[in-house]
Amino acid sequence: MKLLTLLIGILSTFTSIPGFAQSTLLGFQYRNGRCLNQENQEGLNTGHFGECGQVDGISLPNQLLQPGARFMGAHLRGTDLRRMVAENANFERSDLRMITLSGADLRGSQFREALLDGALLDFGSNLESCNFEGVLARGANFNSATLRRSRWTGARLQGSGFRDADLYLTDFTFADLRDSDLRGADLTAADLFGAQLSGAFFNPFTRLPFDRSEAYRLGMIFTP
């Protein structure tokens, strides 16, 4: 019975991918930051790949989705979505812990207050102009990603990797970047006002918006 339920859930996931179920057909819809049904009870749409959906741990690489795809409040923990194309998608308050989005094109997408602990968005992922305000992304990997003009206000990024990432004009105001890896990253014109940088690594190839003496004052660690 458990196997049958799982197979039905996976099948419904695949059938919902091309156009996504209309929000009026979903048992739970995203309203006021929560996934609610008509009785205002919280829950998720099991097997649905979209708004308030739950498809944890499945593998769906190389998906080409319509611009503006809706994943608000969805649970996609541990899901393999590498090389997915979904410009201007909305992942607001979604659970993306340990997700794999390596090589994905998600430019202009919304991740506000999403959970991204341990997520992989590396190997050339295009995240230009994305909104990561208030995300929890401890230990996440953004190495070699394009993140220029993205917003990270108040994000918690302790121990995350941004090695060789393009962070031009990125807004890191009041972000927690302690112990992060910024070696080789381009932070030209980035806004780091109020950011915590103690223990963050940088090297001769890191382009900071301030000089090395200021980096030391902020507690950053230089590695040759």
Image (cartoon, grey):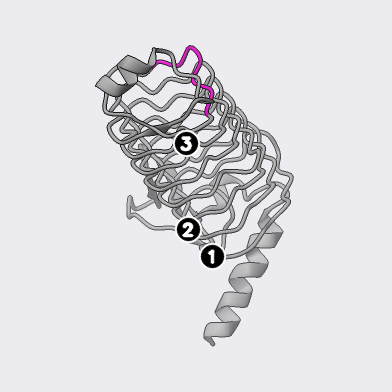
Say whether residue 27 is magenta.
no
The residue carrying mark 3 is 111
Q: Quadrant of residue 200?
A: top left
Task: Look at the numbered disc 3 and give the secondary structure of its residue.
Answer: loop
The residue carrying mark 1 is 57
The residue carrying mark 2 is 77
Task: Look at the numbered disc 1 and give the secondary structure of its residue.
Answer: loop
Quadrant of the frame with the N terminus: bottom right
- State the CA–CA distance, disc 2 to disc 1: 6 Å
Give 20 or 177, whichever is nearer the viewer.
177
* Residue shown at 65% from the left, 48% from the top: 20
Q: Residue 217: x and y, percent?
A: 25, 20
- Looking at the image, is 45 positioned above or below residue 193? below
The image shows a total of numbered marks equal to: 3
Q: Is residue 218 left or right of residue 86?
A: left
Question: What is the three-letter code of the residue carrying label 2?
Answer: Arg
Q: Residue 170: x and y, percent?
A: 48, 20
> What number is the disc on residue 158?
none
- State the CA–CA distance, disc 2 to disc 3: 14 Å
Q: Quadrant of residue 157?
A: top left
Q: Residues within 10 Å of mark 2 (few under 14, many from 20)?
A: many
